[in-house]
Image (tube, rainbow, N blue to C red):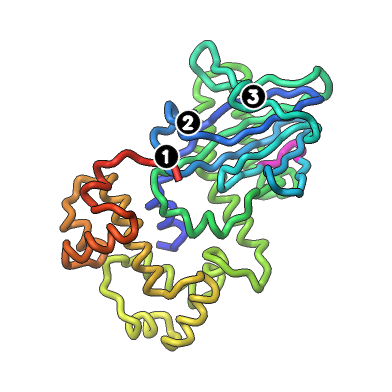
Amino acid sequence: MDALSDMLRVAHMTGGVYLHAEFTAPWCLSGRLTPERCAPFLGPAAHLIQYHYVVDGESRLRIVGEEEEIRLVPGDLVLLPRNEMHLMGSDLGLAPAPGSEVIQPCADGGLFTIRLGGGGAATRMVCGYLGTDSTALKPLIAALPSVIRLKTAENGDGAWIRSTFQFAADEVVKGRPGSETVLAKLSELLFVESVRRYAETLPDDATGWLAGLRDPYVARTLALFHRDVGRVWTHDALSREVGLSRSALADRFGRLVGTAPMQYLANWRMQVAAQKLRGSTASLAQIADGVGYHSEAAFSRAFKKSFGTAPGAWRRSPILAA
């Protein structure tokens, strides 16, 4: 299993449609998702990722605190990996309407809706979210920018995104059943596609977890760790498997990923263990053995160091948003 697929598996991401929105110029909206708003559709989530897809019209987007303003046109999809507060509108210089105050639930219990603006040029969007109750995505999220934009109208291989969203958005407007399910499944695929396309644009001197996936030796190391997390790895065994000296591998891995190989493995073992604690009924001893700890006491100490609480207590605790 490749490292990205395994990280997404452990993160156990779920997706949902948040709302469909109709705006008319002039308009400006501020927003950031909260776990409470999404909980009825998603359940508890430690981290949220928001997306917006422009069906008709255009909009501008800017992360609060940043200067860059992004112009969005039909077929554009933007993801906000860190769910940061942002502005959207025809004119971002206007006083923004708080998103929490203009979102309205549908009378039939379906999608939330937004209708906002002064009656001018129209913009129609579909917005949604992804959530995870795990912190496993942290290395990946840290390697991503605050905004990822896919211009599906300019990419032939993005036609599936464009056509499926167009179909689903039309279904929502017409009130036909099944649209929410279609968009919920699609949102999970969109995140993976966005990450892949962003990784393809990284410069040669880029660093971070995604950059590590492009290096053959680092990618091999990550794949080995993710494929066999419970193996008792040693520096020498890892060096032989990867085909690089210990020192060269440590330098390469540390420069790209930002941590030593064995430290990465230790951190990842804790993420896998955390997912198993909440997602299975396995005993602590079974979970410890599955992530390479043959001593339950040693596992408990390592887990408490990572999460600040013992495994048993953490298993019983509520999920807190990151």
Disc 2 residue type (three-letter): Cys
- Identify which residue, 242 or 137, lies in the foreground: 137
Q: On residue 38, which mark appears?
A: 2
Q: Which residues are magenta?
A: 72-77
- What count of labels does the image hold? 3
Q: Is residue 240 above or below residue 142?
A: below
Q: Which badge, 2 or 1, comes first in the chain's sequence? A: 2
Q: Position of residue 53 (x, y in %)?
A: 66, 36
Density class for disc 1 (Cα within 10 Å; few <14, some 14-19, many ≥20) is: many
Q: Residues within 10 Å of mark 3 (few under 14, many from 20)?
A: some
Residue lying at 80% horizontally and 19% vertically, measured from the top left: 118
Q: Residue at x 55, y 29 (%)?
A: 18
Is label 3 in a helix, a strand or a loop? helix
What separation in Å lies between label 2 and label 1 (alpha carbons)? 9 Å
Q: Is residue 115 left or right of residue 320?
A: right
Q: Tell me if 33 is positioned left or right of 102 in this view.
A: left
Give the labeled residue for mark 1.
45
The amino acid sitting under disc 3 is Asp
Q: Nearer the viewer, mark 1 or mark 3?
A: 1
Residue 33 forms part of the magenta stretch = no
Report the amino acid beneath label 1. Answer: Ala
> At which x and y percent is residue 123?
75, 27
> Which of the 4 image quarters holds residue 44?
top left
Which residue has dot 3 on it?
170
Mark 2 and mark 1 in contact? Answer it, CB < 8 Å.
yes
